[in-house]
Image: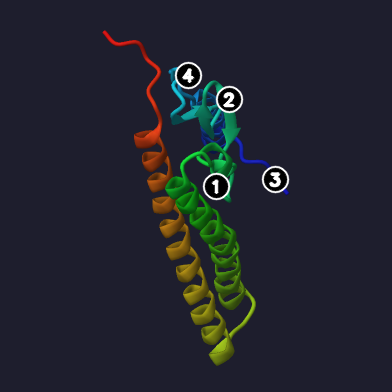
Amino acid sequence: MTRPTGRAGRAGVVLALSVALLELACSTTYQPRHTGRVGLVIHHGVAMYVKDGRELPIGPFNGELEGLVADVPAAAAHAHAAHTQFIIGVPAYMTGLGGVVVGIVVLSGPIGWVVIGVGAATAGTGLGLMGKGLTHAVDAVNIHNDAASDLRPAP
């Protein structure tokens, strides 16, 4: 296999370095105060929940949001629903995308179209569950933060 040389090679190297540097630059500098509320920060391209200085990565299945909002039952119910929907939605989405790729690349004829259709339907269902899970996670944070006592001193 030959390596691209000349302009194409240099452009590829510049693009790769630019993407790497941009990934390293993805972080927030603001750190929420210790108020008992749940916040969101980004460190080195990783989204994290923050509560009272404790940072927990979110990850593909919504992280430990249930534990962070457990002191408010309504928020905990939303966090649990979000976790369940991510646990089902992420694998369904990935499996569906895999089915579409297999149908396009490996299979041909009518069976290929069936696999593509089933894969697309599965991926769509997974994507819908992930979207619904995200809205439950946002609701959990907002409900918790509305109920949390703000410990900031009065102005």
Question: What amino acid type is highlighted by mark number 3?
Answer: Thr
What residue is at 47 percent from the left and 47 percent from the top?
73
Q: CA distance from mark 1 to mark 3?
A: 43 Å
Reading the chain from its start, which is encountered first: label 4 or label 3?
Answer: 3
Q: Which mark is residue 54?
A: 2
Residue matched to label 1: 62
Residue at mark 4 to residue at mark 3: CA–CA distance: 56 Å
Query: Residue at the location (56% across, 40% down)?
Result: 58
Asked if residue 1 is positioned above or below residue 98 in the image, the reply reads above
- The residue where tag 3 is placed is 2
Estimate how packed mark 3 is, as few (under 14), some (14 to 19) or many (20 or more) residues with alpha carbons within 10 Å: few
Residue at the limit of the structure toward the left, as seen here:
155
Relative depth, front residue between 37 and 40:
37
Nearest the eye: 93 or 101: 93
Q: CA distance from mark 1 to mark 2?
A: 16 Å
What residue is at 55 percent from the left and 59 percent from the top?
84
Residue placed furthest toward the top: 155
Q: Are marks 4 and 1 in contact (CB under 8 Å)?
A: no
Circle 4 crowding by C-alpha within 10 Å: few under 14, some 14–19, many from 20: some
Mark 4 = which residue? 34
Q: Secondary structure at mark 4?
A: loop
Asked if marks 2 and 4 touch (Cβ < 8 Å), the reply is: no
The amino acid sitting under disc 4 is His
CB within 8 Å, label 4 to label 3:
no
Query: Closer to the N terminus: mark 1 or mark 3?
Result: 3
Q: Secondary structure at mark 3?
A: loop
> Which is in the foreground here, disc 1 or disc 3?
1
Could you give the CA–CA distance between mark 4 and mark 1, rounded to whole angstroms?
22 Å
Label 1 SS: loop
Considering only order in the chain, which callout, 1 or 4, is on the residue closer to the N terminus?
Answer: 4
Q: Position of residue 43 (x, y in %)?
A: 54, 26
